[in-house]
Image (cartoon, rainbow, N blue to C red):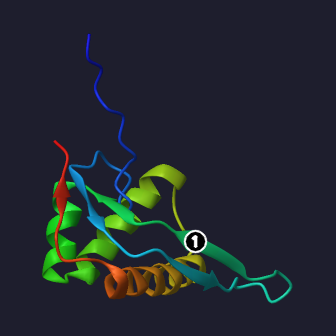
Amino acid sequence: MQTKMELPPCDFCNREPVGYFPCDPFEITSFPADINEKPSRFEYDGQWWACTSCKKMVESGNWSALMNRFLRQLTSIRGNIPSEQEGNIRLHTNALWMTFERYRENNFVEVK
């Protein structure tokens, strides 16, 4: 019996993906809002998973709509986000996505 391959969630909205964007590995440093906390360094591998909706937004460069989708999903998981935290989330997420955009390949690999 063949089992369905388990895929990671969409890297943009956490929903079920249909494939991924190949991407050169990269690192990014995130600076916290609290100056007493240390910056965090994150490493990203070569696959950025996306659902159908997020794939279309990435391919068209509609980062604003993608951010709104991301924040709606985050709010549905965590509840209301205070405006000062939302500003920080937007800032860091945008920096991450623009770095992803710089390193991603143009071809999308569908897996479903």
Question: Which residue: 39% across, 60% down?
Answer: 11
- Please tell me whether mark 1 sits on a helix, a strand or a loop: strand
Q: Is residue 87 above or below residue 2?
A: below
Question: Which residue: 36% across, 34% down?
Answer: 6
Question: Foreground: 100 or 23?
Answer: 23
Q: Is residue 30 left or right of residue 90?
A: right
Query: For the N terminus, which image quadrant?
Result: top left
Based on the displayed image, in which of its 4 quarters is residue 21 positioned?
A: bottom left
* Residue type, numbered disc 1: Glu
Which residue was labeled with disc 1? 43
Q: Position of residue 87 (x, y in %)?
A: 52, 84
- The number of discs equals 1
Question: Foreground: 2 or 31?
Answer: 2
Q: Is residue 79 above or below residue 95?
A: above
Question: Which residue: 38% across, 53% down?
Answer: 14
Q: Position of residue 46 (x, y in %)?
A: 40, 66
Q: Position of residue 44 (x, y in %)?
A: 50, 69
Query: For the C terminus, which image quadrant?
Result: top left
Based on the displayed image, in which of its 4 quarters is residue 37 positioned?
A: bottom right
Based on the displayed image, in which of its 4 quarters is residue 32 positioned?
A: bottom right
Question: Foreground: 5 or 98?
Answer: 5
